[in-house]
Amino acid sequence: MGTLDGTVALVTGASSGIGEAAALALAERGAAVAVAARRGDRLADLAGRITTAGGRALVIEADITQREQAEAAVSRTVQELGRLDTLVNNAGVMLLGPVADAPVEEWERMVSINVLGLLYCAKAALPHLLTAATEAPRQVADMVNISSVAGRVARSGSGVYNATKHAVGAFSEALRQEVTGRFVRISLVEPGAVATELAGHNRPEVRDTIAQRFEGVERLQAEDIADAIAYIVTRPRHAAINEMLVRPTQQQG
Ligand code: NDP
């Protein structure tokens, strides 16, 4: 018996990287997992792996920047899997580069996914998490918001990404104070460099800069962050991990 047996989780951005690994980690511990993102083929493959291993998965194709789709992702999870104990707010993009040269469309994408999309999912999930914390056997529920080292430390060349991830941190702390007395734990995870598709969405010159910055650094694997998420959501009811900063050992800043 895993420690999440009987619980239901929704993971956004589950079609690759950290979200995919988190969905697998939660399913391994017994949670039924709704996996949301835009690439339905990737989600179907992931759901297949979860069910083959004896778990339960629900594929939700959704663009979380569209408020109705974010809300529908939450309501479908509750309708089809029965309730919601855990939201992993993970979907995000990182489009770096100097402010002066930036295509403003990149900023709009980051703000709409990293901030607005996360807020839509958080708001839609909250009543269900509060219900789970009072009515479900565990009497506690979790929202894990994925920020970044960039949510703690601002750097030249990351300005708008820094702004979106600092927003995630500020929102998480305010929401934590609002609901922690009712046993909904709000946690912030701040990864350093993880080997995923994330940096690949940048313009070629920006990709080169990122590659130079992390040259010779053995990056984290998505499973390392999934492990942190699984640790957070399996704590006993009286213990809340508010924040977790996880860097590759060799990453300095
Ligand atoms: P990936 O690019 O592998 O994953 C990003 C996920 O977000 C994908 O599943 C993607 O799915 C989903 N996504 C993007 N846009 C949307 C959208 N509009 N609606 C729904 N889903 C969307 O990167 P990571 O796994 O690395 O990133 C996950 C999180 O971790 C992000 O918030 C990122 O900022 C954070 N992070 C990552 C670090 C790293 O070094 N990799 C370091 C610090 C933080 P699809 O395209 O199918 O919609």
Image (cartoon, rainbow, N blue to C red):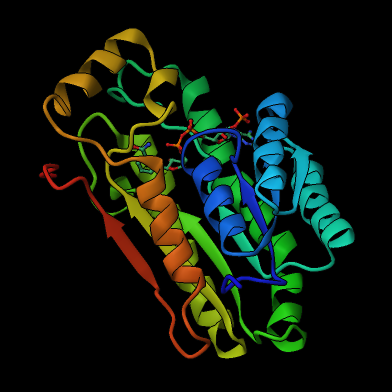
Q: Position of residue 63 (x, y in %)?
A: 71, 35
Q: Nearer the viewer, residue 115 or 7?
A: 7
Identified at 77% across, 55% down, the residue is 74
Res. 155 in view: yes
Q: Nearer the viewer, residue 90 or 71?
A: 90
- Above or below residue 223? Residue 180 is below
Q: Position of residue 65 (x, y in %)?
A: 67, 38
Instruction: Kindly indicate the quadrant of the structure image that contains residue 35.
Output: top right
Res. 65 in view: no
Q: Nearer the viewer, residue 189 or 115?
A: 189
Instruction: Kindly indicate the quadrant of the structure image that contains residue 181.
Output: bottom right
Q: Position of residue 235 (x, y in %)?
A: 46, 79
Quadrant placement of the C terminus: top left
- Above or below residue 214? Residue 11 is below
Identified at 54% across, 72% down, the residue is 175
Instruction: Kindly indicate the quadrant of the structure image that contains residue 8.
Output: bottom right
Identified at 11% across, 27% down, the residue is 216
Quadrant placement of the N terminus: bottom right
Identified at 21% across, 39% down, the residue is 155
